[in-house]
């Protein structure tokens, strides 16, 4: 598999320019960035969260972690991570754990971190563990432009500091 069928259909429908980048099998976004020789801040990860009946797909750099008290304050909720076994059910055309950052395809409300606006190139999971979708900033904005965005994450090395606040 190189790309989830629904992701491929959406990219073609929207008409954005993209490339596929092959890399050795990986099992986390940070590992993917390392194996693909890319800056971790340019490799995007999608994190599915829920607040009771509401689901939210958060799109952040792989070098970051969601700061839940920021997210919950901004979204007026109590969001938590969705368990791994739920992801396989929801993203049924993807390999387990290879969640594309295009949650709107799967019917999810999407929120992306504003720091992604600073990247000229971004790399998203394609739905498998061996390929990334490479987008330039314009293509990313075309895909995410209508989705909500705000600061919802911080670099991994700053995360503990934000928990104390």
Image (cartoon, helix red, strand yellow):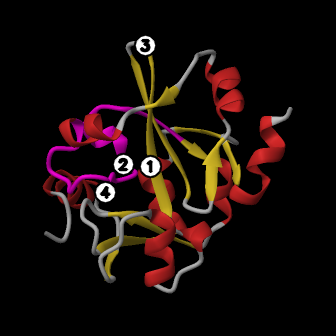
Is residue 9 shown above or below 16? Answer: above
Asked if labels 3 and 4 touch by Cβ distance under 8 angstroms, the answer is: no
Q: Earlier in the sequence, mark 2 or mark 3?
A: 3
In 3D space, how far apart are the residues under numbered discs 2 and 1 (Cα atoms)? Answer: 8 Å
Q: Earlier in the sequence, mark 1 or mark 4?
A: 1
Residue bearing the label numbered 3: 52
Is residue 143 shown above or below 16? Answer: above
Crowd rating for badge 4 (residues with CA inside 10 Å; few <14, some 14–19, many 20+): many
The residue lying furthest to the bottom in this view is: 37
Is residue 37 shown above or below 126? Answer: below
> Residue 15 location in percent, x, y?
28, 62
Asked if labels 3 and 2 touch by Cβ distance under 8 angstroms, the answer is: no
Circle number at residue 102? 2
In this rendering, the label closer to the viewer, 2 or 1: 1
> Residue 120 location in percent, x, y?
60, 73
Circle number at residue 46? 1
Crowd rating for badge 2 (residues with CA inside 10 Å; few <14, some 14–19, many 20+): many
* Residue at 51% across, 56% down: 141
> Residue 29 location in percent, x, y?
46, 64
Q: Which of marks 4 and 3 is nearer the N terminus?
A: 3
Point out the stretch of residues depicted in magenta. Answer: 90-111
* Left or right of residue 155: residue 125: left
Residue bearing the label numbered 4: 98
Asked if labels 4 and 1 touch by Cβ distance under 8 angstroms, the answer is: no
* Residue at 68% across, 38% down: 67
């Amino acid at each position: 598999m190189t790309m989830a069928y629904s992701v491929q259909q959406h990219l073609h429908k929207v008409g954005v320019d993209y490339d596929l980048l092959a890399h050795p099998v990986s099992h986390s976004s940070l590992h993917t960035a390392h194996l693909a020789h890319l800056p971790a801040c340019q490799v995007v990860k999608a994190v599915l969260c829920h607040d009771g009946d509401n689901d939210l797909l958060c799109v952040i750099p792989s070098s970051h972690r969601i700061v839940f008290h920021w997210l919950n304050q901004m979204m007026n909720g109590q969001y938590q991570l969705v368990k791994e076994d739920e992801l396989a059910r929801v993203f049924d055309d993807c390999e387990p754990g290879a969640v594309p950052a295009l949650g709107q395809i799967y019917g999810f409300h999407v929120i992306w971190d504003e720091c992604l606006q600073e990247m000229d190139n971004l790399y998203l999971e394609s739905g498998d563990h061996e390929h990334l979708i490479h987008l330039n900033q314009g293509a990313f904005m075309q895909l995410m432009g209508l989705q909500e965005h705000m600061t919802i994450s911080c670099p991994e090395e700053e995360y503990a500091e934000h928990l104390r606040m």
